[in-house]
């Protein structure tokens, strides 16, 4: 995958492609997301459009028109959030996620946070490998309240990972 194959995805056409990838890779969450939080499709077209409208910039990895993966980043006051990271199921563990993460990280000139499911061990491992650290439960609760809108039940079943810059700023 060439770097030039990565493009911003702000148009509805791009959103359709992102949705296709999302529906595929989100299957990984089945059985991991607490059953009372699971719904299908994991993200509807409307939800995706709302995410774009609320400022999530999606980047995609493509190869000859084939969508390989997608990742979003959202500016939130003094931090940036990595959102909706997905690599097509059959193409995982080939470096696509890392390449997308590097790209979206380069868009942020502030500390970066990521929220994911506590049981999504593969995702936590992926972010750890890329320099992120799982924050304490206290910080998680505070950060989820400050930067995300998630129900209380979801707070308990989530983790927040922070990049080196955020960790350093905590002293
Ligand atoms: C998390 C995700 C985006 C990573 O993308 P990727 O293209 O597979 O990532 P890379 O190939 O760059 O990195 C691979 C590393 O991530 C971790 N990883 C990725 N998939 C894994 C899996 N199924 N099991 C364990 N570790 C995994 C490993 O550390 C792996 O390195 P290794 O293959 O040398 O062991 C991808 O697994 C995915 O889309 N998962 C489903 C959706 C999801 O969980 N999204 C995260 C939302 S926050």
Image (cartoon, rainbow, N blue to C red):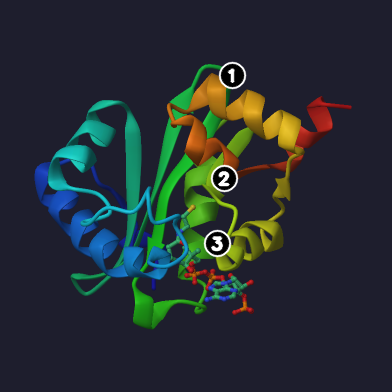
Q: Could you tell whether 106 is left or right of 50 in the image?
A: right
Identify the element where label 2 is drawn.
strand
Q: Nearer the viewer, mark 2 or mark 1?
A: 2
Identify the element where label 3 is drawn.
loop
Does mark 3 have its CB less than 8 Å from ligand 1?
yes
Q: Earlier in the sequence, mark 2 or mark 1?
A: 1
Q: Position of residue 62 (x, y in %)?
A: 29, 67
Residue 20: mark: none
Q: CA distance from mark 2 to mark 1?
A: 21 Å
The residue located at (35%, 50%) in the rendering is 59
Q: CA distance from mark 2 to mark 3?
A: 9 Å
Q: Could you tell whether 54 is left or right of 101 in the image?
A: left
Q: Position of residue 156 (x, y in %)?
A: 59, 40
- Observer able to see residue 110: no
85, above or below 98, in the image: above
The residue located at (22%, 42%) in the rendering is 48
The residue located at (44%, 57%) in the rendering is 33
Q: Could you tell whether 18 is left or right of 106 in the image?
A: left
In the figure, residue 91 lies in which quadrant?
Answer: bottom left
The residue where tag 2 is placed is: 158
Identify the element where label 1 is drawn.
loop
The residue where tag 1 is placed is: 78
Q: Earlier in the sequence, mark 1 or mark 3?
A: 1
The residue located at (46%, 69%) in the rendering is 96
Q: Could you tell whether 133 is left or right of 68 in the image?
A: right
The outermost residue toward the bottom is 90
Q: Nearer the viewer, residue 109 or 54?
A: 54
The outermost residue toward the top is 77
The residue where tag 3 is placed is: 120
20, above or below 15, in the image: below
């Amino acid at each position: 995958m060439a770097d030039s194959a990565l493009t911003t995805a702000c148009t509805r056409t791009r959103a359709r492609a992102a949705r296709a990838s999302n529906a595929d890779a989100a299957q990984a969450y089945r059985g991991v997301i607490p059953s009372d939080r699971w719904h299908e499709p994991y993200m509807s077209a409307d939800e995706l459009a709302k995410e774009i409208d609320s400022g999530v910039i999606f980047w995609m990895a493509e190869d000859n028109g084939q969508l390989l993966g997608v990742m979003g980043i959202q500016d939130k006051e003094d931090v940036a959030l990595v959102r909706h990271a997905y690599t097509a199921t059959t193409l995982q563990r080939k470096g696509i996620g890392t390449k997308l993460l590097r790209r979206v990280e380069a868009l942020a000139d502030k500390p970066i946070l990521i929220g994911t499911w506590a049981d999504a061990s593969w995702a936590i491992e992926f972010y750890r490998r890329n320099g992120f650290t799982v924050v304490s439960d206290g910080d998680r609760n505070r950060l989820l309240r400050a930067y995300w809108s998630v129900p209380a039940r979801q707070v308990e079943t989530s983790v927040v990972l922070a990049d080196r810059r955020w960790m350093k700023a905590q002293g």
